[in-house]
């Protein structure tokens, strides 16, 4: 029988494996669409109309110059369009183009197909337990990090 410490380490290893697999799947979906994961995230955020390059840089732990390069790539591919914001001419407003929406729709369908294949036949009670445990673990990690 495993000790409590061994069980904790097994749980951490399982969580790390899941994190690695989720990351690999995100990269695969993005690559299939001809995007990087960061470009995909920017495109999704622009689609919600809440995109601010400086905030994206802070949350994504990337430099503003790196965000500018990512945005430039999306502009060059005509996946987004930029215009001067009304009210503050120093700001740019970004919108997803028709081509960008089509690409996002394709990416979302691919992502949903993967979700359905992996998650749909899992028992609801197990999914609820997993979600509750994930929330509790996340809360504990956030509390520990804020010390």
Image (cartoon, rainbow, N blue to C red):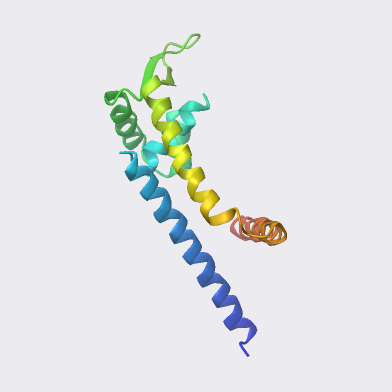
- The answer to whether one can see residue 94 in this image is yes
- Residue situated furthest bottom in the rendering: 1
Quadrant position of the C terminus in the picture: bottom right
**Coordinates of residue 81 in the picture (x, y in percent):** 37, 18
Q: Residue at x 34, y 29 (%)?
A: 71
**Coordinates of residue 131 in the picture (x, y in percent):** 67, 56
Q: Residue at x 68, y 62 (%)?
A: 126
**Coordinates of residue 82 in the picture (x, y in percent):** 38, 17
53 relative to 31, above or below: above
**Coordinates of residue 94 in the picture (x, y in percent):** 42, 21
Q: Is residue 87 left or right of residue 5?
A: left
Query: In the depicted view, which residue is nearer to us: 30 or 82?
Result: 30
Query: In the depicted view, which residue is nearer to us: 76 or 87?
Result: 76
Quadrant position of the N terminus in the picture: bottom right
* Total marks in image: 0
Q: Residue at x 54, y 70 (%)?
A: 12
Q: Residue at x 57, y 55 (%)?
A: 119
Query: In the depicted view, which residue is nearer to us: 92 or 81?
Result: 81
Displayed quadrant of residue 144: bottom right
Query: In the depicted view, which residue is nearer to us: 100 or 106?
Result: 106
């Amino acid at each position: 029988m495993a000790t409590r410490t061994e069980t904790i380490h097994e749980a951490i290893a399982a969580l790390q494996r899941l994190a690695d697999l989720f990351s690999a799947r995100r990269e695969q979906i993005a690559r299939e669409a001809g995007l990087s994961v960061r470009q995909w995230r920017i495109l999704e955020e622009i689609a919600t109309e809440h995109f601010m390059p400086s905030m994206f840089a802070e949350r994504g732990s990337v430099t503003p110059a790196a965000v500018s390069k990512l945005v430039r790539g999306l502009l060059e591919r005509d996946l987004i369009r930029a215009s001067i914001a009304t009210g503050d001419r120093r700001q740019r407003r970004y919108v997803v183009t028709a081509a960008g929406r089509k690409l996002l729709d394709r990416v979302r369908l691919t992502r949903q197909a993967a979700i359905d294949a992996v998650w749909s036949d899992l028992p609801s009670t197990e999914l609820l337990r997993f979600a509750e445990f994930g929330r509790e673990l996340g809360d504990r990690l956030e509390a520990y990090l804020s010390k």
